[in-house]
Image (tube, grey):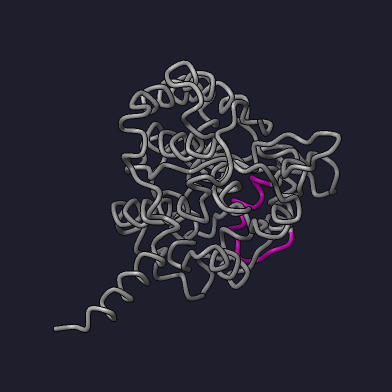
Amino acid sequence: MANPASAAALLMLLALASTSSAQLSTGFYSSSCPGVYTAVKSVVKSAIAKEKRMGASIVRLFFHDCFVQGCDASLLLDDTASFQGEKMATPNNGSVRGFEVIDAIKSAVEKVCPGVVSCADILAIAARDSVVTLGGPNWGVKVGRRDSTTASFSGANNNIPPPTSGLGNLTSLFAAQGLSQKDMVALSGAHTIGLARCTNFRAHVYNETNIDGAFARTRQSGCPSTSGTGDNNLAPLDLQTPTVFENNYYKNLISKKGLLHSDQELFNGGATDAQVQSYVSSQSTFFADFVTGMIKMGDITPLTGSNGEIRKNCRRIN
C-alpha cells in the first residue's frame, strides 16, 4: 500500500495543478442563473441575423481578450482620463468590433439574474453561440470567471499574433498562452468566417510568391498598393463562405489562397502542412480539435473566487 503521506502529497499536487481551471465548470450557473444561456443565445442570434459578420467579430473579441491577462473581459474596458484600456492597441484599434452586442447581452442577462454573470463568461458563451449559429460545432462552455479591474495595453500589443507572423512566431505566441502548435492550427480555423482589412493583407497579395496569382489579383482590385489608401477596405478571410463555419479555410490554404501572410504560413512546406491536410480530408477532425482549442483557450488564467469582480457595465469597472 502506498505511503499515506506521499499519497496525500500527490493529491495536493494534483489539486494545485488543476486549480486554475478546476474552478471553472459547465454547471457554474446551474442554480444561480440557469437562464443565462437562453439570454445570450437570443441576442447573439438576432445580432448575426442583422449582420452575418458579427459572429466572426464576437469570436475575435474572445481570442483578443484571452490572449491578454487571460479571459477576464479586460478588452471590453473603455479608456478613461485615468485608465488606459486595450482597445487602442495596434491589434485592436479600428478592427475589434461587436462591443455593443456584448452590452446588449449583458443587459439581457442582468434582467434574468442581476449581478451574477461576469462579462468574461458572457464573452465565452457568446463566442460559442456565434460558432454554432454559423454552422460550426457545439461544446459545453466552462464558466465561473470574474472580470478584471485592470487591462494591459502593452499585453495587447505584444501577445496577440500579428497578421505578418511567420510559423515560428505564431507557434511561440500560442505557446506563451499554454496552447500547442496543434491548438494554434485548429484555432486559426476561426478564419473560416469574417473579413480582414486591406492594411492586414496588402503585403501578402502584392509582395509574396506563395499565393495563387489570380487570387492575388482579385484581392489587389479592392486593396490599393499604397499604404494609407483603402486601408479599411474589407475582403473575406475565406473566399467561398465567409459566413459559414466549416473547413473551406484549410482548402484555400492548400490552393495558396490564404488571405493573410499568417494564414498561408500554416501550409507553406512546414511542420503544420500535414495537419492542414487532415482538416481538408475531415471536417469533423477540425471541429473536434477546434473545440479542444477553444476550451483550452477559455481556461487561460481566469479570475475566480474573490479575485476580480462582476462588472455591472462591461465597459467600466464598478
Q: Residue at x 33, y 42 (%)?
A: 26
Horizontal arrangement in the rendering, residue 66 relative to residue 181 (left or right): right
Q: Position of residue 13 (x, y in %)?
A: 37, 72
The answer to whether residue 236 shows anywhere in this view is: no
Give x and y (percent) for residue 286: 35, 55
Residue drawn at (46%, 19%), measured in percent from left and top?
Answer: 46
What residue span does the magenta drawing correspond to?
207-219
In the image, 162: left or right of 147? right
Q: Quadrant for the C terminus, please.
A: top right
Give coordinates of residue 39: x percent, y percent.
41, 22
Please give the count of numbered marks on the rendered protein.
0
Q: Nearer the viewer, residue 286 or 295?
A: 295
Q: Is residue 278 above or below residue 72?
A: below
Q: Is residue 125 above or below residue 179?
A: above
188, 18: nearer the viewer: 18
The residue positioned farthest toward the front in the image shown: 5
Is residue 212 among the parts visible in the rendering? yes
Residue furthest top as drawn: 111
Query: Where does the N terminus fall, quadrant-wise?
Result: bottom left
Q: Main secondary structure of the magenta part?
A: helix
Indicate the quadrant where residue 154 lies. Answer: bottom right
In the foreground, 80 or 236? 80
Q: Is residue 18 above or below residue 129?
A: below
Measured from the top left, where is residue 292 in percent x and y? 36, 55
Q: In the rendered structure, does residue 125 fall within the stretch colored magenta?
A: no
- Residue shown at 65% from the left, 66% from the top: 209
Q: Is residue 314 above or below residue 266?
A: above
